[in-house]
Amino acid sequence: MVQAATVLALAVAIALSASAGTLQPLENVLQNAGFAMRSHAASGQIHVVEMDAASVAAIQRWPWDREHYARVVERLDEAGARTIAFDVDFSTASDREQDDRFAAALADANATVILPVFGQRGSFAEKRQLDSLPIPQLREHALLGSVSVSPASDGLVREMPIGTFNADAPRPSLSAQLAQRSGVADDDFPIDFSIQPDTLPRHSFIAVKMGEFDPATFAGKDVIIGATAIEMGDRYATPVHGVIPGVIIQALAAETLLDGVPVEIGWALPLLLAALFAYAIIAARSRNRILVQFGLGATLVFALLHFGASEFALRIAIAPALVMLIAAALLRWAILVREDFEEARLVDAESGMPNRRALERAAATHDRSRIVAAMIDEFDAVKLVIGQDAISDFLARLQDRLRVAGCEGPIYRIDDRALAWVSSLEPLELESRLLGMAAILRSPVEVRGSRVDIKLTFGIADVNAPDEALHAASQAARHGECFAYHEQAQKSALDQQLSLMGELEEAMEGDELSVLYQPKFDLRAERITSAEALIRWRHPVRGDLRPDIFIPLAEETNRIDELTLFVLRRVIDDVREWRKGGLEIRAAINISARLITSADFTARVESILLEDRVPADRLIFEITESATIGQFDLACSALRRFRDLGVGVSMDDYGTGQSTLSYLKRLPLTELKIDRSFVQHAHRDHADALLVSSTVELAHQLGLQVVAEGIEEEACLDFLREIGCDYAQGYFIARPMSADAFFDTAQTTIARAA
């Protein structure tokens, strides 16, 4: 109850402060930092025609005759511009002949033309608004768009309206019309100042008037015409970019709306989430200083959420949540420093980490595990760089890295220059995990302003042998290896691997291996028309073994060919049974890229296919894309032979490996399979959506069908339908299932689609 009351008091105080606006300066700083972090180029859809110094010098009078504007409209219209918008005041009549000339150009234009409206106070002392509209002769041939700009209290322009009320009527803003967005008049939206103004396509007014441009530049584009010459004024202060012309602000606002109207989230929801983290910080009983790091880590998570959310057109105020987390972390720290270590003898005094004695106590409960020691290379040099008093911070950063890399359980300091932990992973999985850790630790860490390179070598030993693990780590360092086993642990690991490979051969002859089928849903036919074959191993002692454990081992020991042929024969048998039952289905078999260049393997596959137990066109070979194909010409030749027999060829996991566009051009593919990492969130992640949709379009241009895997939500499936994807695969469609279950499921979808 005390902890809950503390968090509630903090939340109320911070909420009152946020409501009063005292946290707005911090919020502005965070917004500006977010703009800097996400800095990117404009889309290229919005072009600016500048009334610049060169144009002023060429025309030599002000105001300009409206014949100049008419000629620019005609030039842009002839070039195929989609929209022509003016940020120029036409509220007063000029020479009648000039007005007639401009009005005629507006009337004849095929492009949509937008003329500006705006409101302003009659004088400094009065609140009455005077509305400025284009003269009737001009506005009857154009749409009207508001160009009103309202700086914030600090004088900076951060927001623009979706629309305004002018002349007693709601008017959409110029930016909203350019982006074709709708909304409520007088509702404001934040401008995305991460867009770099200097990347907006810009053209001199006089050059456009004289026709000195490539007409293709403007085809299908939206154009804003406005003043950028200093002597014309119309300049405003903005965050990040300083003082810039009003027409550039209008263009940035339109660019912002191209990605959708930002949605206001505010600060209440982030503060509520921060309160949950704050409660966890304050209520925790651990003395370990990692608790404070957790608070700072949570702060970082919220900061990243804040910056990342803007990619989804969300407007989130994060400052109150940040203050909440920092306050909770500092409060808990103040409590922790008053407490004595309850188990001082189990803690390393310098780092605050559990020590060797704590490891030995933990090891007593892990009789089937191993100990991993991580030796810090050149530790004395690290101390010279950061100083003795910064070692604790250094070790804390190192712990963070190890946890990000997948270190499970507590991490112990068992020597001045070594950490350790207990691992229950199988040898192959542990080795893979250590290699991943080594890769993550290649980048330096920052400790009190100094960047420190880290290199660890790992030693593996029985769980009750920390000295042997340290010795093995030293041996790994001496021989330039990432890790090494102590002799006894190495013997145990090798025995397990050899045993597993011997048992794999027995499993292929017995009934331990099974082939499951994950359906592929035809998005046009609205039914299941194919499946991917997936191998599973139910070991009588070790239980269900994941494919990522035994398949790499099969590759290393040159047994992957037999395993693949086992799957091929089983799939052919199942497809034949399905056909007897009246079900025509194509089944895909995964084939390692390295096997395609094996003459013996391809010959054996051809022999199986020529047995003619099922038509070859019922089969698809999915070639793994995660590694470069060696002997490329030989692989192409083998795949063409399979194609000639009728087998489909698919590029699996497209986008995650080392393939190039030349692969798509040269390989005899019939299908492209987009990896789940791009598909899973494509319906709500703009970048993923662009990658997936462009890949589908490219594949179709090349005559390939497209399978998207990783569908876990209906919204993702709907997105794939919209972009014309051919097939969908994932848990939302169905999980892998037995051959009999697949037969029933496929028949059900066929009946439903009929």
Image (tube, rainbow, N blue to C red):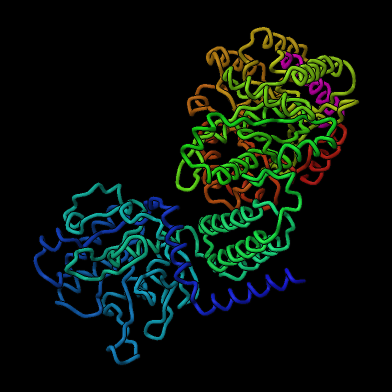
Q: Is residue 550 left or right of residue 144?
A: right
What is the magenta segment's predominant secondary structure? helix
Place residue 36 in its image quadrant: bottom left
- Kindly identify the residue that appears in the image at 70 percent across and 50 percent down: 713
455 magenta-colored: no
Q: Residue at x 90, y 18 (%)?
A: 510
Name the quadrant of the C terminus: top right
x, y (%) of residue 747? 83, 39
Quadrant location of the N terminus in the rendered image = bottom right
State whether residue 614 appears in this view: no
Residue 574 picture location, percent across and down: 83, 25
Residues rendered magenta in the picture: 559-586
Name the quadrant containing residue 649: top right
Looking at the image, is 700 positioned above or below residue 512? Answer: below
Depth order, front residue of 140/326: 326
Look at 14% across and 70% down and name the residue there.
65
Q: Is residue 18 left or right of residue 6?
A: left
User: Horizontal placement of 112 versus 667: left or right?
Assistant: left
State yes or no: residue 577 in magenta: yes
How far across and down, in percent of the image, does residue 420 sit? Answer: 69, 34
Comparing 26 with 283, the one in front is: 283
Q: Residue furthest left?
A: 60
**Horizontal side of residue 551 vs 417, given as left or right:** right
Q: Residue at x 67, y 38 (%)?
A: 413
Q: Position of residue 294 (x, y in %)?
A: 64, 54
